[in-house]
Amino acid sequence: MFLQIDQVDVRYPGQPRPAVQGAALGLRAGDIGVLIGPSGCGKTTLLRAVAGLERVSAGAIRLAGETVSSPRLHLPPEQRRVGMVFQDYALFPHLDVGRNVAFGLRHLPAAERTQRVAEVLRLVDLAGSERRFPHELSGGQQQRVALARAMAPNPRLLLLDEPFSNLDVDLRERLAQELRGILKAAQATALFVTHDQLEAFAIGDAIGVMHEGRLQQWDDAYSLYHRPATRFVAEFIGHGVFVPARIVATERGAQVETPLGGLMNLTDCPLPGAYPQDACDLLLRADDIVHDDDAPVKARIVRKAFRGSEFLYTLQLNSGEIVMAHVPSHHNHKLDEWIGIRPEVDHVVTFPPRGG
């Protein structure tokens, strides 16, 4: 692994617990890793520790096999050969684009410096903009200048701390896809911090979900969504809810009894006896529930969110349980209306009952 984080703790003086505790992940050369989680979960602190801006109190951080952080060793940021893009881009307003990008290239002869600036500006699709000033650029263009400046010295690792947080939602999603293309074209290894799942899915080869200082799971997007390792990951990623369920044996195999009826022929289904009294909590994603007017199970619409091509309906069953469903937007039902639904589940995600 090019970047190896091994059981790292980061502790601030006077705090009752570490800001980061037991973090462990590996990132291959040329891959893009993403740290995601709610505010205050420790993702930016871990990024800063990789950059050398925070010291670790336990564990170790290695870059290309070289230990750069441990309780006994702390390589300064300027010796780690990492580039960093901040939330506010930190461009120098009094310098034009060319001089902003060249800021970390002062060790090069003038001709080589000019050539490298032109190379990275072409890479971020801003060729010929050397003489423009930051205030003359859009937010997305400023973000790409900041990226070009970070890439110009050929760092071993790029670190990006919520670089799209100041941009509007539509622009962020498009730039996230552009950023992945730029980093892949440059064969760059990068670690990216965001709180936005769509950004994480658009950019990341590997994604880490953090909660209360702990890295809950480090995996690809598909596995985070379909095979969450913890209840927090299951609830944080995607739209879904837990409903009470029981796993029982039948002549045709294991069946999961749910408020929407029995489910069979499932992958990843625990065996009967896996939980005390066979009781568990079953995760039902919005895409596990299908709107079907002829279905025997009915549910009341308690909330609806228009998403263009679809609605996200929050539904309440007769039993009081809440489920969610993506429904094509031409099915424009009213709040409090009852509609038919049926489960369409091919694999299950279960956890012990909350409090059990």
Image: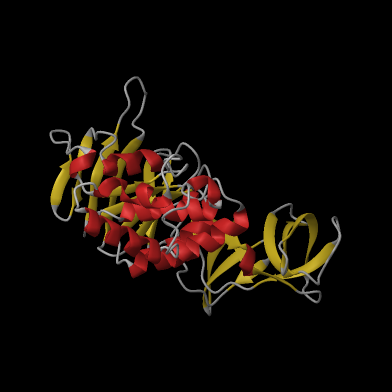
Left/right of residue 323 with respect to residue 48 in the rendered view: right
* Residue at x 51%, y 50% (from the top left corner): 164
Q: Position of residue 165 (x, y in %)?
A: 53, 46
Left/right of residue 232 with respect to residue 118 in the rendered view: right
Q: Position of residue 246 (x, y in %)?
A: 56, 60
Image quadrant where residue 80 sits:
top left
Q: Nearer the viewer, residue 300 or 330?
A: 330
Q: Count the labels in the image.
A: 0
Q: Nearer the viewer, residue 27 or 339?
A: 27
Establish if 3 lies above or below 71: below
- Quarter of the image with the N terminus is bottom left
Q: Position of residue 306 (x, y in %)?
A: 75, 60
* Residue at x 22%, y 52% (from the top left corner): 4
Q: What colour-coding does the image apply?
A: secondary structure
* Residue at x 80%, y 77% (from the top left corner): 294
Establish if 324 lies above or below 294: above
Visible residue check, residue 142: yes
* Residue at x 39%, y 61% (from the top left corner): 121
Left/right of residue 311 with respect to residue 154 in the rendered view: right
Q: Position of residue 143 (x, y in %)?
A: 47, 52
Visible residue check, residue 278: no
Establish if 250 lies above or below 78: below
Q: Nearer the viewer, residue 16 or 184?
A: 184
What is the residue that sits farthest to the bottom in this orientation? 252
